[in-house]
Amino acid sequence: MGGRVRERGSKGKKTEWEFCSVLFLYLSLLSSLTSCGIIRDLCAIMFEFGFICLLVHLVASVPQPPCRRCCDHLPSLDDAANLRDSVPAMPEVRTYINMTILKGDKGDRGERGTPGKPGMEGSTGPHGAEGPKGAKGQAGAPGDACKTQHSAFSVGRRKSLHSVDNYQALIFDTIFVNSPEHFDMFVGKYRCRIPGIYFFNVNVHTWNFKETYLHIMQNESEKAIVYAQPSERSIMQSQSVMLSLQEGDEVWVRLYKRERENAIYSDDVDIYITFNGYLIKPETK
């Protein structure tokens, strides 16, 4: 097939060469025989053009070396596969870094830096909602006994007493309780040393056919009366009262004067007359 193509190409080139030779000869004869200048100039131009085409054709008809691919010297695909299989495979290289070698010892702790300036105080936020009421706490331990304020007394009288021209304060001769000795036995009066609320009570025995008329006094003020009308029988009479006292106040029992014949009874065997009092609640400051 390749031989046929080359032969056909050589025949075509020979025919083209013969055609160009005949054309040049005709143009040269025409330009020499004609007497017209225009035709002669045209023949000359065509002659020069044809001569240039002839030279180009001659250059192109020079035989060229056979075509060769740039990869003809390489082995075929099958040979390359066999060659690759015959070459030993390259080992895979993986990089490994020993971190224990690169990591150094832990350094010392640095010095503490200076504190920064305090920021501006913010505005007070809105008042939050009231929380639920907590459970009742346990009772606390008892307080120190020496700090507990107390005052109490209870005294009695073994002798009867009759009224005279003046008022008389009941003087007592028997002590049941006097802690811490706020009751003065010599004058028969309780002197307040701890302001607060106190409870007082007096008990007497009436005399037959005589009136009983006494008062519980705060300083010089009458606070409560103990009274019994004359009777054939003697009876026990009692009175109680609560008073708010300030330091220095005095509480005592007063027998009314002779304007009204009255008396209270007692003897050496039994105690019929008593006067009692104690602090209920100290005043809170």
Image (cartoon, rainbow, N blue to C red):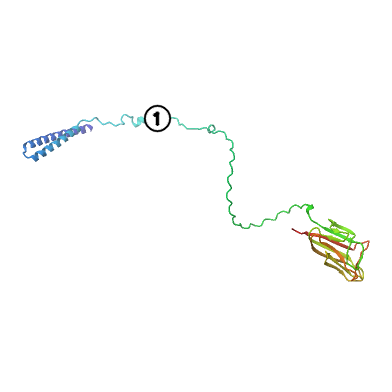
Q: Is residue 213 left or right of residue 11?
A: right
Q: Nearer the viewer, residue 166 or 28?
A: 166
User: Is 271 left or right of 73, judged from the image as shown?
Assistant: right
Q: Position of residue 278 (x, y in %)?
A: 82, 60
Please, what secondary structure does the residue beneath circle 1 have?
Answer: helix
Residue 127, quarter of picture: bottom right
Query: Percent position (x, y) of residue 162?
Result: 92, 67
Look at the image and tell me whether residue 2 can be seen. Answer: yes
Q: What residue sits 36% from the left and 30% below the top?
A: 80
Q: Position of residue 36 (x, y in %)?
A: 7, 40
Mark 1 Cα-neighbour bin, 10 Å: few <14, some 14–19, many ≥20: few
Determine which residue is flagged by label 1.
Answer: 85
As drawn, which residue projects farthest toward the right? 268
* Residue type, numbered disc 1: Asp
Front-most of 224 and 7?
A: 224
Q: Nearer the viewer, residue 191 or 154?
A: 191
Q: In the rendering, at what x and y percent does residue 116 appear? A: 58, 45
Q: In which quadrant will I find the N terminus?
A: top left
- Residue 7 makes an appearance in the image: no
Q: Quadrant of residue 209?
A: bottom right
> Quarter of the image containing the C terminus?
bottom right
Number of disc labels: 1
